[in-house]
Image (cartoon, helix red, strand yellow):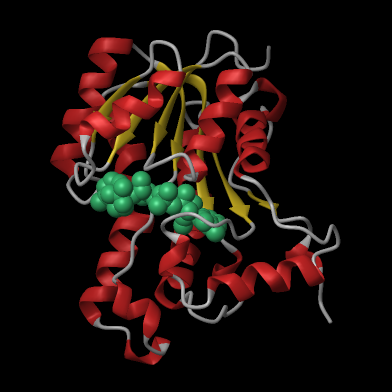
């Protein structure tokens, strides 16, 4: 199996609609041992209840807004599970008003918040993981991004700017992590109905447009995103780093 004997840390699980859950299911099917982190805003019992499906899975709280929380959480994971083979970063947040108003009204604090949680957190996680030697050589980090970084998408606003920062960070992180043989890539997933996506104004019409215009005329599933993540975690992607791979039924390739 593709991920046999690999330990993968899944960061950003909220419920069964989360993209992180699709990645977890695919990685499990491919033989990986899974460790989860969740936002401390969530109830531990709720998370533990639904990850029961994954044998021996453990979940740890981690607030990516705080370096101290990331440090404490990753150290706990290293002490309990030893070195790991991969990290999924499936985390983003923006203030609701910054997604509802026109982009021009984005506040200074809203800009800082969305960039901090959705982009800077990847840098902090990568750095701390390296400092405590959590990652094995040949490990792979995968983050989630969206087309709204490349083109303006109605209602995506500050998240688009944060995702552009995330994608650029991936190229710089690839250079630094590459010195230790570690790869880092992003998946640009097509729109998926998750709790976070509900925050985007008129999200339903984005799904309709993809169905109409994408070459494959349908929306993607979390399982399809998960399968691409499994590939990126595996030796089959051993020469891929610093990339953004679109898993969007071809939507981003279509012009007029
Ligand atoms: P989701 O299920 O709501 O997952 C988002 C996760 O981010 C939640 O678990 C949330 O925790 C977590 N988070 C927010 N702030 C955090 C913090 N300070 N510390 C730790 N965790 C925090 O939504 P999703 O759609 O699967 O999103 C996952 C990733 O995919 C995001 O990066 C998103 O931008 C990206 N993406 C989504 C789509 C889409 O259409 N859905 C498309 C492309 C890319 P809480 O439980 O506390 O909220």
| Quadrant (top left, top right, bottom left, bottom right) of the C terminus | bottom right
**Picture quadrant where residue 72 is located:** top left
Residue 150 drawn above or below residue 37: below
For this orientation, the residue located farthest to the left is: 68
**Residue 251 visible in the current orientation:** yes
Residue 252 drawn above or below residue 5: below
Q: Position of residue 1 (x, y in %)?
A: 68, 11
For this orientation, the residue located farthest to the top is: 5
Q: Position of residue 166 (x, y in %)?
A: 45, 57
**Picture quadrant where residue 37 is located:** top left
**Picture quadrant where residue 157 is located:** bottom left
Depth order, front residue of 146/46: 46
**Residue 136 visible in the current orientation:** no
Residue 145 drawn above or below residue 129: below
Depth order, front residue of 229/42: 42
Q: Residue at x 62, y 75 (%)?
A: 205
Q: Residue at x 21, y 29 (%)?
A: 73
Q: Residue at x 44, y 45 (%)?
A: 90
């Amino acid at each position: 199996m593709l991920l046999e004997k690999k330990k993968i840390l899944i960061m950003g699980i909220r419920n069964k609609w989360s993209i992180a859950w699709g990645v977890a299911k695919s990685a499990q099917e491919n033989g990986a041992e899974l460790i989860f982190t969740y936002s401390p805003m969530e109830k531990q019992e709720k998370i533990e209840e639904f990850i029961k499906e994954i044998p021996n899975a453990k979940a740890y709280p981690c607030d990516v807004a705080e370096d101290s929380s990331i440090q404490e959480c990753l150290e706990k994971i290293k002490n309990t599970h030893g070195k790991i083979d991969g990290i999924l970063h499936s985390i983003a947040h923006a203030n609701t008003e910054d997604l509802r108003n026109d982009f021009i009204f984005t506040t200074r604090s809203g800009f800082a918040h969305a960039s901090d949680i959705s982009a800077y957190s990847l840098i902090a996680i990568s750095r701390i993981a390296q400092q405590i030697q959590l990652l094995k050589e040949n490990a792979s980090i995968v983050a989630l991004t969206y087309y709204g970084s490349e083109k303006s998408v109605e209602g995506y606003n500050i998240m688009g700017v944060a995702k552009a920062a995330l994608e650029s960070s991936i190229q710089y992180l690839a250079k630094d992590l590459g010195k230790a043989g570690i790869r880092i890539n992003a998946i640009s997933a097509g729109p998926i109905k998750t709790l976070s996506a509900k925050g985007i104004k008129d999200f339903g019409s984005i799904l309709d447009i993809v169905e109409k215009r994408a070459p494959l005329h349908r929306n993607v599933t979390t399982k399809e995103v998960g399968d691409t993540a499994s590939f990126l975690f595996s030796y089959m992607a051993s020469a891929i780093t610093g990339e953004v791979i679109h898993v969007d039924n071809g939507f981003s390739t279509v012009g007029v």
